[in-house]
């Protein structure tokens, strides 16, 4: 049992890593063609393709009952699963600590803007110390409400959970970081699609905002690990990106279906189940013979 679990985990991570590389290669061209909102949908591909490897495998005559990965890790499956479980606990503890530190900053008024929480998200606004005008605070509030409406906090929490489960996979961590940036770009585009005249004010508000310097695993925040994310966001505000409501989503949906199918095809085929008659013929258990004895008929008087 441990061998099958470990083989499934390795196979899902390999497929997920390939899917992350595909999204990293496609995200910028798709963003230029269809806008940030459509490009953000590409990040559904890695988890979808990875989970597709867990579906029942196809049957094929002559297939080996034991896959290559299972045969390779068979002798070390128990120890490797123990190491994975320890790493899972350590990463989850780190995420909980980061969340607690961020919430402590929220309580002291040193965090925001952000959205915290997963089941019932709530908006955290920066301190009302006169730094922002009423129009700027309205834009910040619209941005965070857009996160809530798009259920971005749940997507971020799901990405953090995948980072914990796949802690040994560097592609998962890179993908989660870039996904959060694309999430902010999509949210910016959604807000400005409804407020096209506030583009310049939105850019000034971004420059004035105290961006989060510590991670928020379960929520949404304006990340600032280096100047690059902010430069990208400001740069995209210079031109309006039309939201393609038909072609772009259809293209993304088709790509997700194909990616899930390819992920399922990675599963090694298994031999078809033997028919019941074959199972009966190959039964090597003890046999029992029955002898029928006919009693002689009684003599007629």
Image: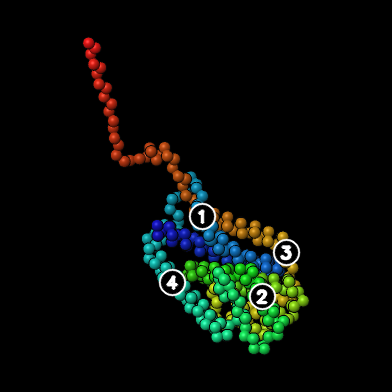
Q: Of callouts 1 and 3, which one flags the residue occurring earlier in the amino acid sequence? A: 1
Q: Of callouts 3 and 2, which one flags the residue occurring earlier in the amino acid sequence? A: 2
Q: CA distance from mark 4 to mark 2?
A: 34 Å
Q: CA distance from mark 4 to mark 3?
A: 42 Å
Nearest-to-viewer mark from 4 and 2:
2
Q: Position of residue 22 (x, y in %)?
A: 60, 64
Q: Position of residue 161 (x, y in %)?
A: 51, 69
Q: Of callouts 1 and 4, which one flags the residue occurring earlier in the amino acid sequence? A: 1
Nearest-to-viewer mark from 1 and 2:
2
Residue displayed at 65% across by 80% down:
230
Query: Residue 182 appears in which quarter of the rendering?
Result: bottom right
Whether residue 185 is visible: no
Q: Of callouts 1 and 2, which one flags the residue occurring earlier in the amino acid sequence? A: 1
Give the residue number, with chain letter if any, for mark 4.
89
Taking the image as shown, residue 294 lies to the left or right of residue 22, namely left
In depth, the one of 186 and 8 nearer the eye is 186
Query: Residue 222 appears in which quarter of the rendering?
Result: bottom right
Give the residue number, with chain letter if any, for mark 3.
244
Secondary structure found at label 1: loop
Secondary structure found at label 4: helix
Q: Of callouts 4 and 3, which one flags the residue occurring earlier in the amino acid sequence? A: 4
Give the residue number, with chain letter if any, for mark 2.
143
Q: Given contact means CB atoms under 8 Å apart, are the residues at marks 4 and 2 in contact?
A: no
Whether residue 54 is visible: yes
Q: Position of residue 26 (x, y in %)?
A: 64, 66
């Amino acid at each position: 049992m441990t061998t099958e679990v470990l083989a499934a985990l390795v196979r899902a991570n390999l497929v997920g890593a390939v899917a992350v590389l595909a999204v990293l290669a496609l995200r910028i061209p798709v963003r230029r063609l269809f806008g940030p909102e459509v490009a953000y949908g590409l990040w559904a591909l890695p988890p979808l393709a990875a989970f597709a490897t867990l579906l029942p495998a196809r049957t094929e005559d002559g297939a080996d009952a034991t896959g290559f990965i299972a045969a390779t890790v068979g002798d070390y499956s128990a120890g490797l699963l123990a190491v994975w479980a320890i790493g899972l606990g350590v990463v989850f503890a780190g995420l909980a600590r980061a969340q607690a530190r961020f919430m402590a900053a929220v309580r002291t008024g040193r965090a925001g803007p952000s959205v915290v929480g997963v089941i019932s998200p709530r908006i955290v606004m920066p301190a009302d110390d006169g730094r922002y005008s009423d129009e700027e605070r309205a834009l910040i509030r619209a941005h965070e409400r857009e996160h809530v409406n798009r259920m971005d906090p749940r997507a971020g929490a799901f990405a953090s959970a995948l980072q914990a489960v796949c802690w040994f996979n560097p592609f998962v961590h890179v993908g989660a970081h870039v996904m959060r940036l694309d999430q902010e770009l999509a949210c910016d585009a959604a807000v400005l699609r409804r407020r096209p005249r506030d583009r310049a004010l939105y850019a000034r508000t971004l420059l004035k905002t105290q961006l989060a310097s510590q991670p928020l695993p379960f929520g949404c925040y304006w990340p600032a690990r280096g100047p690059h994310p902010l430069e990208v966001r400001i740069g995209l505000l210079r031109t309006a990106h039309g939201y393609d409501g038909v072609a772009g989503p259809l293209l993304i949906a088709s790509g997700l279906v194909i990616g899930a199918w390819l992920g399922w095809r990675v599963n090694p085929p298994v031999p078809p189940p033997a028919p019941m008659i074959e199972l009966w013929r190959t039964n090597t258990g003890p046999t029992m013979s029955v002898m029928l004895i006919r009693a002689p008929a009684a003599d007629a008087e």
